[in-house]
Amino acid sequence: MDLSMVVSSRLLNEERYSEPDPPPVPAVFIFGDSTFDVGTNNFLLNQTKSKADMPFYGIDYPHSKPTGRFSNKYNVADCIVQLLGYKESPPPFLYLVNNDSEHFNTQILKGVNFAGGGAGILQDTGIKRFGRVISMGEQVEQFSSVCSNMSEYLNASAAESIINKSLFLISVGSNDVNEFLFFNVSNSSTLIHQLQQFLPFLMDNYQTHIKNLIKLGGRKFGILGAASLGCVPDVRETYNGSCSDEINFAAQEFNALLRLSLFELAFDFPQFKFSFADAYHISFAIINNPSRLRLSEVKKACCGNQTLTGGTPCGPEATVCENRDEFLFWDRHHPTNYGSQLVALNLFNGGAEYMVPTNFSMLVKL
C-alpha cells in the first residue's frame, strides 16, 4: 500500500484514540530495545548511559514529562497498541516491581513492557557502549516470572488462555548489528564474509528467545526487522549527509535471515503465528517520500541542534525544532512521535511489500 494513502486513510491525531473499540487481544507483551522502551532504563539509575529521562525527551507528552521514551511523546510501541485501542504501551516490568507492586497482579493481565534501551539479542550486546542493559534473554526471564504470577493469581488454565490470546511485540537486533559492525568490521571488503559468520549465530540466539516465549504460551507475534540503520542522523553525520551503504546492507541481510527463521519456527511450531515487518523498506520508503507524508526533514534530528555536523545529543542543553511533526527523527537514532505513527500505520495496513505473511491488523484476528 502506498504510504501516502495510509496517512490519508487514517488521520493521525489524538481524537483517533479518545473512544477506542474494545481491544482485539486481552494483553500485549512487549520486548526489545529503545524502539519500544517506555521507561525500563529509568530504573537502572547510574548503571547505564542509554537513558531518556531528561528534557527534552517527552516535551509533547502530558505535562512535558520525560518518561524514558526516546521520543518527543510516544514511540512505536505506543503507536502500535493505540491502534489496538489502548491508551499507550503497558508499563515497564521494572516500574510494576518497584513502584506499583500493589497492582502488579492486576496490571500484568493487561500486558507488560520489558524493552530496554541498548538491549540486544546477545547477552553482552550494549555493555561496551552503555553499561547495564536488560538483554532479550533477561526480558524473557522477566516474562517467565510474570507467567508464574498470573498462574498463582488466577489459575494455570486461565493464565494460559490469556497468554495464548495476547499479542507479543518484538523489536530487537539493531544494537547487535551496529556493535558487530563497529567493533569487528574494519574493512568493507570483508563485510559479506564476516556477516555470513555472525548473522547465523545471532539468529540462532534469536530463535532460542522466541522458542522460550512459545513454550511460555506465546502464540501471536508481531516482529519488527531492522530499519534503515545507515540513514539515521548519527550515521549521516559521519558520511557527510549520506546514508551508509554498508550499514544498510547489514540491516537488509539481518532482515532476510530473520524472515527465513520465522518461517522455520512456524514449521516447527504450528501454534506459532507471526507477522514480520520489513522495517528497512518501511523506513526507507518514508525517507524517500517525505513531502507526500507531510515531512519536511528526514535527515536531521529535531532535538540536538538539527545539524549533521557539530550538533549536540538530545538533552537539556540541546535546541529543539518547533515543527516536530515535520521531522522524521527526534534524536540521532529514534523517530519522532509522528514518525512512529507512520511506522505503526504501515505495520497494521501494509501489504506484502512490507508485511509477511500478513499485517498486524490481520494477525490479531487469528
Image (cartoon, rainbow, N blue to C red):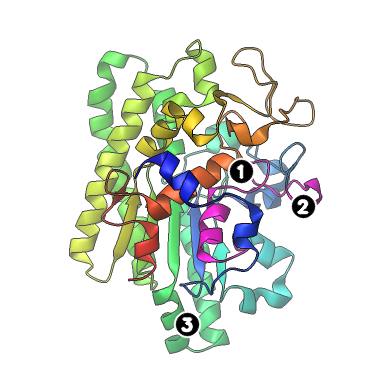
Q: Label the magenta part by its dominant secondary structure.
A: loop
Disc 3 and disc 2 in contact, CB within 8 angstroms: no
Outermost residue, top side: 240
As rendered, which of 23 and 57 lies closer to the eye?
A: 23
Query: Disc 2 marks which residue?
Result: 62
The answer to whether residue 126 of the structure is visible from this angle is: yes
Secondary structure found at label 3 = helix
Outermost residue, left side: 267
Mark 1 Cα shell of 10 Å, populated few (<14), some (14-19), many (≥20): many
Q: Is residue 95 above or below residue 236?
A: below
Q: Is residue 359 above or below residue 193?
A: below
Sequence-earlier tag: 2 or 1: 2
Q: Which mark is residue 159?
A: 3
**Quadrant location of residue 209?**
bottom left
Residue type at mark 3: give it: Ala
The answer to whether residue 329 of the structure is visible from this angle is: no
Query: Disc 1 marks which residue?
Result: 337
Q: Residue at x 42, y 44 (%)?
A: 5
Residue type at mark 1: give it: Asn
**Quadrant location of residue 324?**
top right
The answer for how far apart the CA atoms under marks 3 and 1 are is: 34 Å
Q: Residue at x 66, y 52 (%)?
A: 39
Q: Which mark is residue 322?
A: none
Q: Residue at x 35, y 56 (%)?
A: 359
Q: Is residue 238 above or below residue 112?
A: above
The answer for how far apart the CA atoms under marks 3 and 2 are is: 34 Å
Secondary structure found at label 1 = helix
The picture places residue 298, in percent across and down from the top left corner, at 53, 26
Magenta segment:
61-90
Residue type at mark 2: give it: Pro
